[in-house]
Amino acid sequence: MVSYTHQGTTSSALTRLSVNAARLVGIPPEGYAHLLGLAPEHLHDDLCRPPSATSLRIAELTTSHISWAELSMVLAQQSDIGALGVWDYLITSAPTPLEGIRDAAAHLATFADTATDTLRITEDGGQITISHINQADLAHEAACAVRAYVLSLCLRRLSEAAQRPLVPVRVTLASKAPRRRHPLTEQYGTRTIDFEAPGSSITFLTADLNAPNPHAQPGLSAVLRRHADQSLATAMPLHNWLDLFRTALASVHDDTTPSLTAVARRMAVSTRTLQRRLDDHGTNWKNEVETLRRTHITQLLRTTDLSINAVATRSGYADARTLRRAIQRWYGTTPAALRRTNHPHSETTTPGTTNQAITTE
C-alpha cells in the first residue's frame, strides 16, 4: 500500500527523463535547476522521490518550445526498458502481457504520483482497454504530454513483452488535437486517435495481450512485485526543505552522532543558516538527530542480534544504561521488550509532528 508520504512525488527516474527531454529541446537549465529534487545527490539516487511539481514545471517549460505531442514522443524515445526501473520488468517478465500490465497498474506508484494518475484495465468481449486517469484540464499542455506519454509507454512495454509490435485497436486522448498529429501516429502506430475524449485510453485485441510472453520467467513476477513494494517502503519522498535536510542528515550518519558542520557543508549553507531553517520548520538539530538515532536503534534491535552494549556503541551512546533510558523515554519499554515484540509505538514518527501530508514549498 502506498503511504501518504508518497503522494505528491514521482520517482527520480521519471524526473531524470523530464530533465533529459528539456536538455534535448534546449531549455536552459537555469530555468529549472533550482527546483526541489534536482540536486545531483537526489536526482541520481533511486531512493529519492522528487515532488511531482518539479517534473510538471519542467514539462511546462518544455512545452513552451515544442508541442505536447512532440514532448510525449521525446519522452517515449528515451524510455528504453529499464529506464523506469522495476516497473518496466513487471510487464516484460510476466507470463502474458495482460498479467504484466495488471501488475504494473497495481504498482504505478513506483514511478508516478498516484494522487493524480492511475491506470485502469477493463475487458469487453474481445478487447482490453488500458485507461490512464488524469484529471488535469484538457488545455494544460504539460498534462496532455503526460497522458500521451503514459499510453505510449504502455504500448512500448507490451510490445517488448510480446516480442513483436502490437497495434492498438484505437487510442483516445483527453486532450485537444495538436496541430501536428504525426508524433502521435508514430508513437502509437495508428491513425485511429480520438481527441477531447472523456478519458485517455489505449485498446488492444484480447488475443494480443493474452498470448504467452516469449521470455516469461516462471516465478519472477512474484519476486518483482516484492521488489516493487520494497522500493516504495524504502523510498525517501522530498516534499520540502525539511525532507532535503533529513536525507542529508541520514547520508552523513555513520553509526555515530552526525556533525552539524558536515550536514551544513553537504547542503551548501552555513551552520547558522541551517539552524535557522530548522527553527523555521518547527524543529531543531537535537530533535532531528534524536529521531534519526531512534530509527537507527530500532532497526538494529529488530534486524540484528547485536548486544545492547553493541547497539549503544553503534548509536553514539556512552553505554547501555543511557540507551535503555532513551528507549524508555521514546517507547515506554525496554530494549529487550522492543526487540521481542512489535511495540505499538514503534513507528518512527518525528517528535512534535503529526501524520499530515507536507505541502510543497
Image: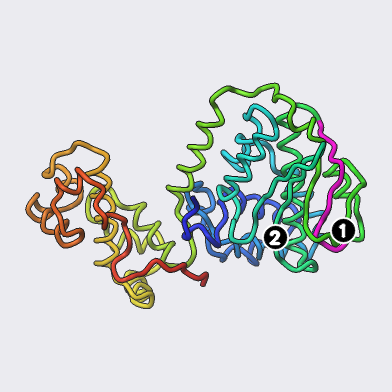
Q: Are marks 1 and 2 in contact (CB under 8 Å)?
A: no
Residue 141: quadrant of the picture: bottom right
Comparing 345 with 313, the one in front is: 345
x and y percent of residue 31 in the render?
65, 67
Which amino acid does the dot numbered 1 rest on? Phe
Crowd tier of the residue under label 2, counting other residues whose Cα lies within 10 Å: few below 14, some 14–19, many 20 or above? many
Please give the residue where the numbered disc 2 appears in the rendered image: 134
Q: How many angstroms separate mark 1 from mark 2 (CA)?
A: 15 Å
Residue 353: quadrant of the picture: bottom left
Comparing 320 with 262, the one in front is: 320
Residue at the spot 70% in from the left edge and 57% down from the top edge: 133
Give the magenta range.
165-176
x and y percent of residue 124 in the render?
79, 42
User: From this viewpoint, which residue is outermost toward the front?
Assistant: 125
Comparing 44 with 219, the one in front is: 219
- Say whether residue 202 is magenta: no
- SS state under label 1: loop
x and y percent of residue 262 in the render?
32, 58
Left or right of residue 10, residue 261 in this image: left
Residue at the spot 19% in from the left edge and 36% down from the top edge: 305
- Residue 195 is marked as 1
- SS state under label 2: strand
Q: Main secondary structure of the magenta part?
A: loop
Which amino acid does the dot numbered 2 rest on? Asn
Crowd tier of the residue under label 1, counting other residues whose Cα lies within 10 Å: few below 14, some 14–19, many 20 or above? some
Earlier residue among tags 1 and 2:
2
Left or right of residue 88, residue 167 in this image: right
Comparing 67 with 306, the one in front is: 306
- Say whether residue 170 is magenta: yes
